[in-house]
């Protein structure tokens, strides 16, 4: 028996279906291209999306195990309140931060400006080594 290592949770067929859908092809067109039925195309797509969701959950679990925490602060929250929220979140996961609350506030002001108002949702990642990464959230 020969073992072939998989580089993806998606089969080549699933990848092809997802790419063709992304290109705007209908399921009927994809079925014709692949020489299969429309219902089979639906099944391939459904299994592919299920595999993607499993991969996302697996990655979230892995990052939690590694001590990385991601938090989102909604737009409108005063910047001055965010450092305490970050400290609380780090403490929940037993992460010792490398920055003080003053350092965090300074970085937030530099990045987002207005102390009284966060103009956009902010994604904050607390890494296991205590570093903090901040950026405007992509909304995911």
Image (cartoon, rainbow, N blue to C red):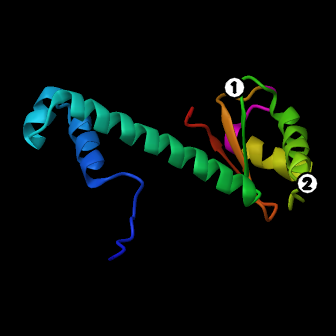
Residue at coordinates 20% horizontally, 31% vertically from top-left? Answer: 24
* Res 75 label: 1
Q: Residues within 10 Å of mark 1 (few under 14, many from 20)?
A: some
User: Looking at the rendering, in which quadrant would you find the N terminus?
Assistant: bottom left
How far from the left and from the top, in percent, is residue 14?
29, 46
Q: Hey, which quadrant is residue 20 in on the image?
A: top left
Q: Of residues 140 and 63, which is closer to you in this image?
A: 63
Residue 115 on the magenta span:
yes
Of label 1 and label 2, which has the lower sequence position?
1
Q: Taking 14 as reference, is 121 left or right?
A: right
Label 1 close to label 2 by CB (< 8 Å): no
How far from the left and from the top, in percent, is residue 125?
71, 49
How far from the left and from the top, in percent, is residue 89?
85, 43
Main secondary-structure element of the magenta-colored stretch = loop
Q: Taking 54 as reference, is 124 left or right?
A: right
Residue 83 visible at all: yes
Q: Residues within 10 Å of mark 2 (few under 14, many from 20)?
A: few
Residue at coordinates 83% horizontally, 37% vertically from top-left? Answer: 82
Residue 26 visible at all: no
Residue 43 on the magenta span:
no
Q: CA distance from mark 1 to mark 2?
A: 23 Å
Q: Taking 137 as reference, is 9 left or right?
A: left
Start-end of magenta stretch: 111-116
Q: Please, which residue is most extreme toward the top here?
A: 76
How far from the left and from the top, in percent, is residue 63?
68, 55
Q: Which residue position holds label 2?
A: 100
Question: At numbered mark 1, what does the secondary structure look like: helix, strand or loop?
Answer: loop
Q: As displayed, is residue 69 above or below residue 20?
A: below
Q: As displayed, is residue 24 above or below residue 13?
A: above
């Amino acid at each position: 028996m020969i073992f072939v290592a998989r580089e993806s949770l998606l089969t080549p067929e699933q990848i092809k279906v997802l790419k063709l859908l992304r290109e705007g092809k209908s399921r009927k067109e994809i079925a014709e291209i692949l020489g299969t039925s429309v219902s089979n195309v639906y099944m391939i797509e459904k299994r592919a999306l299920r595999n993607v969701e499993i991969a996302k959950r697996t990655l979230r679990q892995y990052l939690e195990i590694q001590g990385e925490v991601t938090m989102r602060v909604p737009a409108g929250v005063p910047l001055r309140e965010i450092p305490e929220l970050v400290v609380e979140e780090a403490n929940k996961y037993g992460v010792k931060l490398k920055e003080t609350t003053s350092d965090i506030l300074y970085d937030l002001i530099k990045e987002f400006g207005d102390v009284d108002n966060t103009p956009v949702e902010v994604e904050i990642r607390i890494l296991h080594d205590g570093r903090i990464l901040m950026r405007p959230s992509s909304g995911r």
